Image (spheres, rainbow, N blue to C red):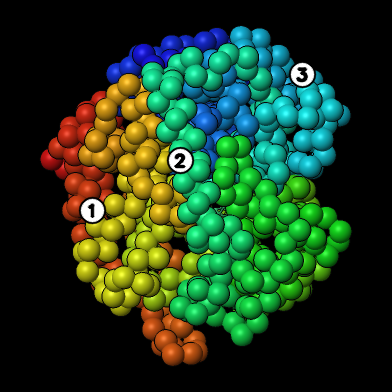
């Protein structure tokens, strides 16, 4: 077999043992890598109902067949586990040198099991696995931890770390890596913390290309691709503002989250938009092998260097009505240092301010108060006082507050909505509603098409089709092969390139249809995972976006009064289910499982719920 090492390293932190398992080409072709490997392992090995923060959960770090090879933006890995936020399968895609080093160490995935009796750093160097006691590192932020790793293992040691938020089991803690990268929004950092695993460091000495089927071709394709993406970027200038170019666009289209999503635009948004970020920029950061370097760093208002993307600014700035870029930079820096997801943090603070304003909760926090937000972020990371409540995420907070506060808790299945306000974007609302991991834009960024090429007000089934098309590309192809999707989205680097990379690396010729079948398998299995966990309460309302979007219209501007229509949304959802071969409850039919060659999944699932034929 070429393209994969064919090896999974399994480590047990409870008894400090490890073993290496092998897999064959059939497994690799069926699951591809990354999200596919993680999903399959977690589905097969986790008993339903286990505590995501207990010893039975498993943390997976998984590569795909092209992650780490020298081609545009391939320095990415999937981090996954059962999510403490949603209770379903959760993952994130993070830029890290581990994409290269784990492959060079001879593995395609790392499975971490059990719980250590003391804080540890897992060190992997080819077949050598060490569990280093790092009691003295526990309590450190991610920046300091990364410095300690560099001191101990060298400047370029590939790593993944957690901060205090992960240690203290904040349900939306993320994992961090070099230069500002963060991933695992559904609380994968908390799973790492629950295992007392402060850091993972990997070094490999094998030749990266030993497992590549056609080495010369791949090297040639890779360098041509890098050159091409650079040229495309010279034409688009995208990296000058990177993802934050989207902020003014969202503002103009009434799709910006402002004041806990109550409003959709703001006259001060220019203070934190792409141009403002470009002016403040002091450096750009990027993942390994990246030729686009999208992380724009600025000096924050406390003297740190903070790396910002649109989601961070949208949720910690506009959503909290903080239109001061250096102050937003500090909120972002704190989230990075403590290891908190910026999207959920911005949403939690917005929900908190909203609940206080409505007299549903006692507190002093108000929209626009950057200093109080800084304090609260610290309290969340340490679960101190009200921070303990905020650390639970908006779904659980609203359950505690009651009084219909769930209507303005901006989450789906427990994961907070990313920075797109969908009061008048039915297609994007559907993308949030049906994402397999909760409300993450990573699965289908259909809003781009909805606001430019499609009729915005339409609930036509074409929108459901487009959501599925994007879920297949973004949530399937890019999460299985593992490469950053920005060259394709932002620079128009053709998808065919990835088919060519796959073929040169593995020697296997796959058509797009082969990849779409794999993607559909991921979506069926993510759905099966959720349904197995929530069989008794499962219903299609779990695929609805937050109730606010059906009840609280756009308040001002040209689109004032526009709002999502519940009945039409439900019809769009039915169209989505039909296209996916899922029944009216949103559960894949037996025939769909069969078509996707996962009959074993349907057999297991039918122990929990009746399946339609
Ligand atoms: C991603 C989510 C995003 S998506 C952003 S900004 W974005 C936020 N970034 C955070 C951050 O930073 N610090 C922090 N403490 N929390 C943060 N939470 C938010 O996390 C990310 C980039 C981005 S930047 C995006 S869209 C693309 N996402 C990709 C993806 O999902 N898959 C893929 N194959 N390629 C992608 N390319 C782009 O990668 P999560 P990263 Mg991320 C500081 O992980 O869990 O999916 O959350 O990992 O390496 O930082 O890259 O406008
Ligand atoms: Fe990483 Fe951004 Fe480059 Fe993608 S474009 S590889 S997220 S730095």
Q: Earlier in the sequence, mark 2 or mark 3?
A: 3
Residue at disc 1, secondary structure: helix
Q: Earlier in the sequence, mark 1 or mark 2?
A: 2
Q: Position of residue 571 (x, y in %)?
A: 22, 66
Q: Is residue 459 visible?
A: yes
Q: Position of residue 583 (x, y in %)?
A: 20, 49
- What residue is pinned by disc 2? 225
Q: How crowded is the residue under tag 3: few (<14 C-alpha within 10 Å), some, or many (20+)?
A: few
Nearer the observer: mark 2 or 3; the answer is 2
| Real-space CA distance between mark 2 and mark 3, rounded to the nearest whole angstrom | 40 Å
Which quarter of the figure has residue 38?
Answer: top left
- What residue is pinned by disc 3? 132
| Real-space CA distance between mark 1 and mark 3, rounded to the nearest whole angstrom | 48 Å
Residue shown at 44% from the left, 30% from the top:
220
| Real-space CA distance between mark 1 and mark 2, rounded to the nearest whole angstrom | 37 Å
Residue shown at 73% from the left, 54% from the top:
283
Q: Position of residue 488 (x, y in %)?
A: 42, 50
Q: How crowded is the residue under tag 2: few (<14 C-alpha within 10 Å), some, or many (20+)?
A: many
572 up-or-down from 391: above or below: below
Q: How crowded is the residue under tag 1: few (<14 C-alpha within 10 Å), some, or many (20+)?
A: some
Residue shown at 74% from the left, 73% from the top:
324
Q: Is residue 8 visible?
A: no
Residue shown at 71% from the left, 14% from the top:
130
Question: Viewed as shown, does residue 5 lie left or right of 199?
Answer: left
Q: Earlier in the sequence, mark 1 or mark 3?
A: 3
- What residue is pinned by disc 1? 577
């Amino acid at each position: 077999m070429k393209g994969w090492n064919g090896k999974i390293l399994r480590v047990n932190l409870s008894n400090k043992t490890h073993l290496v398992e092998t897999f064959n080409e059939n497994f690799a072709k069926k699951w591809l890598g990354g999200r596919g490997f993680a999903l399959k392992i977690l589905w097969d090995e986790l008993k339903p109902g286990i505590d995501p923060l207990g010893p039975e959960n498993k943390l997976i770090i998984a590569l795909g067949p092209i992650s780490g090879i020298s081609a545009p933006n391939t320095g990415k890995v999937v981090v996954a586990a059962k999510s403490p936020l949603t209770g379903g399968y959760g993952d994130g895609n993070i830029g890290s040198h581990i994409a290269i080093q784990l492959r060079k160490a001879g593995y395609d995935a790392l499975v971490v099991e059990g719980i250590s009796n003391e804080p540890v750093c897992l060190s992997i160097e080819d077949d050598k696995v060490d569990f280093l006691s790092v009691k003295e590192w526990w309590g450190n932020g991610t920046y300091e931890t990364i410095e300690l790793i560099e001191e101990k293992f060298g400047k370029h040691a590939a790593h993944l770390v957690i901060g205090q938020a992960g240690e203290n089991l904040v349900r939306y803690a993320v994992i961090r890596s070099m230069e500002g990268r963060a991933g695992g929004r559904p609380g994968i950092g908390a799973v790492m913390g629950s295992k007392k695993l402060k850091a993972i460091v990997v070094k490999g000495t094998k030749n990266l290309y030993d497992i590549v089927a056609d080495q010369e071709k791949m090297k040639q394709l890779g360098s041509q691709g890098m050159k091409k993406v650079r040229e495309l970027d010279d034409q688009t200038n995208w990296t000058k503002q990177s993802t934050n170019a989207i902020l003014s666009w969202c503002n103009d289209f009434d799709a910006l989250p402002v004041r806990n999503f109550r409003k959709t635009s703001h006259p001060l948004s220019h203070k934190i938009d792409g141009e403002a970020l470009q002016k403040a920029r002091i450096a750009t950061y990027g993942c390994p092998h990246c030729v686009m370097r999208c992380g724009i760093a600025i000096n924050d208002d406390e003297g740190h260097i903070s790396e910002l993307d649109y989601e961070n600014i949208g949720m910690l700035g506009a959503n909290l009505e903080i239109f001061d870029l250096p102050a937003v930079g500090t909120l972002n820096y704190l989230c990075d240092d403590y290891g908190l997801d910026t999207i959920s943090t911005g949403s939690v603070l917005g929900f908190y301010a909203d609940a206080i304003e409505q007299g549903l909760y006692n507190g002093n926090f108000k929209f626009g108060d950057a200093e109080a937000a800084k304090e609260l972020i610290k309290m969340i990371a340490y679960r101190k006082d009200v921070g303990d409540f905020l650390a639970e995420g908006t779904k659980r907070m609203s359950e505690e507050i009651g009084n219909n506060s769930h209507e303005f808790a901006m989450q789906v299945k427990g994961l907070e909505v990313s920075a797109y306000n969908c009061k008048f974007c039915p297609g994007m609302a559907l993308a949030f509603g049906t994402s397999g991991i909760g409300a993450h834009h990573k699965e289908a960024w259909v809003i781009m098409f909805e606001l430019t090429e499609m009729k915005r007000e339409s609930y036509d089934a074409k929108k459901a089709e487009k959501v599925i098309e994007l879920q297949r590309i973004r949530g399937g192809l890019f999460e299985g092969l593992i490469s950053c999707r920005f060259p394709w989205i932002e620079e128009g680097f053709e998808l065919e390139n990835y088919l060519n990379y796959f073929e040169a690396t593995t020697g296997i010729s796959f058509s797009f249809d082969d990849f779409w079948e794999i993607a559909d398998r991921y979506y069926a299995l993510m759905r099966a995972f959720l349904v197995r966990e929530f069989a008794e309460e499962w219903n299609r309302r779990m695929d609805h976006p937050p109730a606010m979007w059906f009840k609280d219209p756009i308040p001002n501007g040209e689109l004032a009064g526009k709002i999502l229509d519940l009945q039409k949304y439900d019809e769009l959802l039915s169209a989505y289910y039909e296209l996916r071969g899922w029944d009216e409850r949103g559960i894949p039919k037996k025939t769909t499982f069969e078509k996707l060659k996962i009959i074993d999944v349907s057999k297991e699932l039918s122990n929990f719920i009746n399946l339609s034929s």
